[in-house]
Image (cartoon, grey):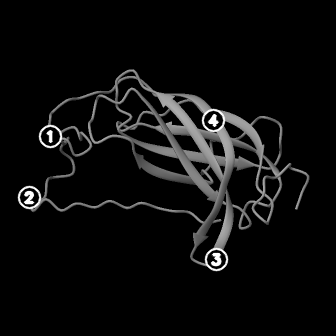
Amino acid sequence: MRLALLLLAACTGKEPVDSSDDGPPINQGNDSGDECYGNDPVLTSITLTNGGAVQFDDGTFPTIQVNVEGEDADGNLDVITLEIWFDADVDEQVDTSGPDTVSQVITLSANDCVTTTGSASLRVQVGSGLSYNTLYDVAARITDAEGEVSNALVTTGSTPRENGLDGDGTGP
């Protein structure tokens, strides 16, 4: 399965700081000084759709798109990490204590402390790791800009067929 990773690095040109010291709060690149934390985000919706064909390094493949909606009373959904797990044992339960199947950092807003609701989608390649036309339980959760983790929601759906058409879960 393809796993996209986003690596952000910044150099400030400042002198190194002793790592044993507590640093200032990180406000997602905004220097307003606003702090918004203390409330865990709440995932309110998860749906699955056919994500269409997407070009990957080794060809074009069908994808399944995982769509989520969430809210956070303290408004720090400006940057989230969306984690997704797939489980072929369809029983409406997914173990989210282990490593996720795929995750992505997503920026929802350039402003911190004002994003109380948001939605995000992630396409996942089918045919490499996920089987075509197969039912899966899918769990998702989000982590907000302050590292606070939401509840996980689970839904069940089928991956697309090898030709990219909607699947019905009856197998490849």
Q: Give the residue number, with chain letter if any, for mark 3.
A: 59
SS for dot 1? loop
Q: Please state the horizontal and vertical placement of residue 49, each as a whole percent of the image.
A: 68, 46
Q: How many marks?
A: 4
In this rendering, is residue 65 above or below 33? below
Calculate the distance from the C-alpha at mark 4 to the C-alpha at mark 2.
43 Å
Q: Give the residue number, with chain letter if any, for mark 2.
A: 14
Q: Name the mark nearer the viewer: 1 or 2.
A: 1
Amino acid type, mark 1: Asp
> Earlier along the polypeptide chain: callout 3 or callout 4?
4
Picture quarter containing residue 152?
Answer: top right
Calculate the distance from the C-alpha at mark 2 to the C-alpha at mark 3.
44 Å
Q: Which mark is residue 47?
A: none
Residue under the image location 14 percent in, 53 percent down: 17
Q: Give the residue number, with chain letter if any, for mark 1.
A: 31
> Earlier along the polypeptide chain: callout 1 or callout 2?
2
Q: Name the mark nearer the viewer: 3 or 1.
A: 3
Amino acid type, mark 2: Lys
Residue under the image location 22 percent in, 46 percent down: 29
SS for dot 4? strand
Q: Name the mark nearer the viewer: 4 or 2.
A: 4
Asked if labels 1 and 3 touch by Cβ distance under 8 angstroms, the answer is no
Q: Name the mark nearer the viewer: 4 or 1.
A: 4
Left or right: residue 50 compared with residue 75: right
Calculate the distance from the C-alpha at mark 1 to the C-alpha at mark 2.
16 Å
Q: Give the residue number, with chain letter if any, for mark 4.
A: 46
Amino acid type, mark 4: Ile
Left or right: residue 155 compared with residue 81: right
Amino acid type, mark 3: Gly
